[in-house]
Amino acid sequence: MDIGLLSIFLIVGIVFLLLVGLPLAFSTGAIASLATIYLFGVDALQLEAMRVFDMMGNYVLVAVPLFIFMANMMERAGVAERLYTAVHIWSGRLPGGLAIATIIACCLMAAMVGIVGAEVVTLGLIAVPTMLKRGYHKNIALGSVCAGGGLSTLIPPSVVFIVYAMTAGVSVGRLFIAGILPGLMLAALYIGYITIRTGLQPSLAPPASMEEQNLSLREKARYLKGLILPFLIAAGVLGSIYAGLATPTEAAGVGCVGATVACLVNKNLNIASVRTVLVGTLRVSAMCYWLMFGAQCIIGVYNRAGGAAFVKSIFIGLPLGPIGIIIVMQVILIILGCFIDFIGILLLTMPLFVPIIVELGYDPIWFGVLFCMNMQISYISPPFGPSAFYLRGVLPADTDITVTDIFRSTIPYAFLIVVALALLMAFPEIALWLPALME
């Protein structure tokens, strides 16, 4: 079969199975099996099984369930509520102080959990009702939580980085460090937007109460005590990687121990909570691994049929120049992000895109940060943006807030992510400066 026709068959087949309700992992696996049998015979299915087993032996993958366990345990420890309260007390005098506090809390939580869903759900339960109760416009309240939660894709320890590193064959530790400055830059853009918007329209975000504004420095400092242990955990995980004392997998193990200790100190550790954390970790990890298995199979058969060379020739042949090709890739990722989960996008596209990036002379670490920033758009893009559904799922059933309201509230933040992408493409050092210091 011609490689062009094969490409069309694979795409149409996967889309068809997705439309009839088959999960992405099994859609890719089924189409890969059919293509393998047609092209290479039944015996070639053994090669697909070997690819899956080879991937399962990758030591980096051990970090995935460990970081998921750490995220779930930190959530059970009740850290988020203390974190949000403390940040709000310190930012209460600023225009849109609660929304700004939400973005800052998202940054700090991202450094502890690394999972978007955990952030959006937790702050959706805490921050959104608080802001609405204090008279904040729903667009400010919903947008800050939905977009801010996506910072977990950039600020380490990001699970997206782990899967990208495994797929692209680059260092997880360098990716973690590369995501810090871009993540903080994007958070600063969010805060700047909220400050300007609420400064021009104060009715969107009423100021904090006089009681909160007039707290003494000592009283404000008292709220920070509950953050010491979580901060030490995050600093220990990232610091050990940056200093070269531990691999990301080893640091994840340390983080799991620290999160368990935090849960114990906060008196939330019991058999029921441990069981909930373990079941949640198993469920999310299994979903991730099945997606990886299906993607490995489809990419395996496509590459054996010459797909990688075909895609490479198409991109290299575009009369756009290197940066134009990068922009086309970004557009493709944004479009795919409207319909497919980030793991599916990563595993389906990066084996094809990364060799092209290297051929063009770009650093795959830098492109990994671009990819993660793109995935933030996917989390808030209709029709299937996961963050919007996470947030709507934790809001009271009788509320008048709809999924459409949530998507509408994230529009300004999507534009800000595009601005951040442009800055990162124009100035790659934003992502590459800190990793260079590790050498």
Image (tube, grey):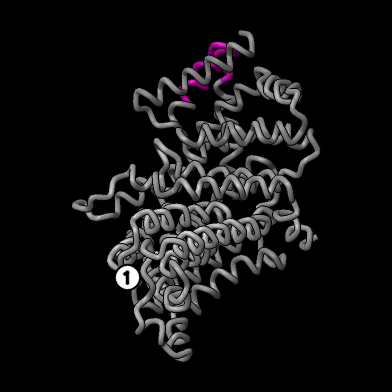
Q: Position of residue 188 (x, y in %)?
A: 57, 61
Residue 85 is one of the magenta-drawn residues: no
Q: Is residue 212 left or right of residue 395?
A: right
Place of residue 180 in the rendered image (x, y in percent of width and height, measured from the top left): 63, 60
Q: In percent of the image, x 41 and y 79: which residue is there?
A: 265
User: What segment is highlighted magenta in the picture?
Assistant: 29-44
Three-letter residue code for mark 1: Asn
Count of labels shown? 1
Residue 408 drawn at (x, y percent):
39, 45
Q: Residue at x 43, y 66 (%)?
A: 96
Q: Would you name the residue on which mark 1 appears? A: 270
Residue furthest to the front: 200
Query: In the drawing, does residue 213 fall left or right of residue 347?
Result: left
Decide if residue 42 is in sight here: no
Occupied quadrant, residue 254: bottom right
Residue 59, relative to residue 181: is it above or below?
A: above
In the structure shown, which secondary structural element does the residue marked by tag 1 occupy? Answer: loop
Q: Residues within 10 Å of mark 1 (few under 14, many from 20)?
A: few
From what the image shows, is residue 412 above or below residue 307?
below
